[in-house]
Each structure stands twice: as structure tokens, then as C-alpha cells.
Image (cartoon, grey):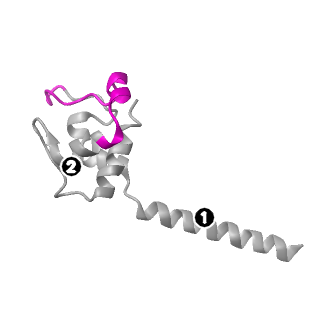
Amino acid sequence: MKRTGSLLVVVAVLALVGATAVLAEGADGKALYDAKCAMCHGKDGVAKPMAKGAQNFNDPKFQEATKLEAIETVIADGKGKMKGYKDKLSADEIKAIATHVKTLK
């Protein structure tokens, strides 16, 4: 029984290490958003007054009407005063930011 218990512990540790490695490989959308977007769009998705024309990401109408792919396109190509990030961020980083934007409901 002791051996089975030890084996289960080893399997659980390996699973945890594997899950951590997967998370480490993926882009951190919140951290990227905080660094690149929050200065205008606010950490909570409420656009700052100085950023006239910036979208409020916590607006339920925006969240309902806007698909993830559309957010990715705006991040990559830019819109209005916002310049695109396609030359500064990877596709995975752009997707991670867009995914985070969808959480700002």
C-alpha cells in the first residue's frame, strides 16, 4: 500500500509540474494588458478620461457584441489613435490580451 501511495504522490507531482510548465509557456494576458493597455483602457476595463475615444471593455454591450477575433484584430492592427501591436507582440500574446479583455465584464 505504501508503494501505491508513493506512486500516486509522484504522479500528482509530475502532473503539477507539467501543468505549471504549460502555464509558463503561455502568454500572461493580464500582465500584458496591465503593461500595454491599462494606461488608456484602465486595469478594470474602464477607459481613462485622458484617453478620449478609448473603449470601455467592461461595457456589457461591447462584451456581447464583440468577438475575441475582433479584439485580436484591433490589438494587432490598431484603431483610431491606438497603434497596432502586430510588430511588437506575438500572435499568442495578442490572443492572451484579447482573452483577458473578454474577462473584464
Residue 18 image position (x, y, % from top left): 56, 68
Pointer 1 local density, CA inside 10 Å: few below 14, some 14–19, many at least 20: few
Query: In the image, which disc is placed on residue 76?
Result: 2
At label 1, which amino acid type do we have? Leu
Residue 103 image position (x, y, % from top left): 41, 37
**Residue 20 part of the magenta segment:** no
Q: Nearer the viewer, residue 68 or 48?
A: 68
Helix, strand or loop at label 2? It is helix
Residue highlighted by disc 1: 16
Instruction: Examine the rendered structure and indicate whether residue 34 appears above or below residue 28.
Output: above
- The picture quadrant where one finds residue 8 is bottom right
Helix, strand or loop at label 1? It is helix
Residue 31 can be seen in this image: no
Residue depicted at x 30% and y 45%: 33
Pointer 2 local density, CA inside 10 Å: few below 14, some 14–19, many at least 20: many
Bounds of the magenta segment: 49-69
